[in-house]
Image (cartoon, rainbow, N blue to C red):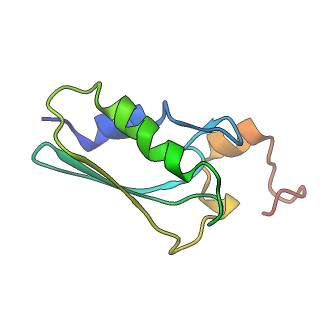
Amino acid sequence: MVSEQQVKEKLEDVKDPEFDINIVDMGLVYEVNVEDEDVHILMTLTTRGCPFHGIFEEVINQELSELEDIGEIEVELTFDPPWTMEKMTDEGRNKMGAVPGHGMGF
């Protein structure tokens, strides 16, 4: 059976095309749940009007389908809470060149 850790590792291969940073480090993935072989991902986008919203589900499905013993994949979008740069990992901030207190919204 696929694990939440395996799913999260594969999600690190999915990049936000606007920033070229993976969606985990961007802080877009709020929750990953695996029940039996089915995967549910709760995520957000940087903005409600993000032009890439349709791309993420397709790329996520493509990446996760490479895992063995995976069932249905559900990607649920939410904007509650809305994404902010504070949700980014330290690695994501470093990749973006964001330094707290230096004009990057921190």
Q: Is residue 1 left or right of residue 58?
A: left
Q: Name the quadrant of the C terminus.
A: bottom right
Q: Residue at x 89, y 55 (%)?
A: 102
Closer to the camera, 65 or 9?
Answer: 65
Q: Residue at x 43, y 40 (%)?
A: 58
Q: Residue at x 64, y 58 (%)?
A: 46
Determine whether 86 is above or below 5 in the image: below
Figure disc tally: 0
Determine whether 10 is above or below 49 in the image: above
Can residue 104 be seen here? The reply is yes
Percent across and percent down for residue 13 are 49, 30
Closer to the camera, 104 or 39?
Answer: 39
Residue farthest to the right, as pictured: 103
Q: Residue at x 50, y 35 (%)?
A: 14
Percent across and percent down for residue 60 are 41, 39
Q: Is residue 23 left or right of residue 64?
A: right
Determine whether 78 is above or below 74 in the image: below
Q: Name the quadrant of the N terminus.
A: top left
Can residue 24 be seen here? The reply is no
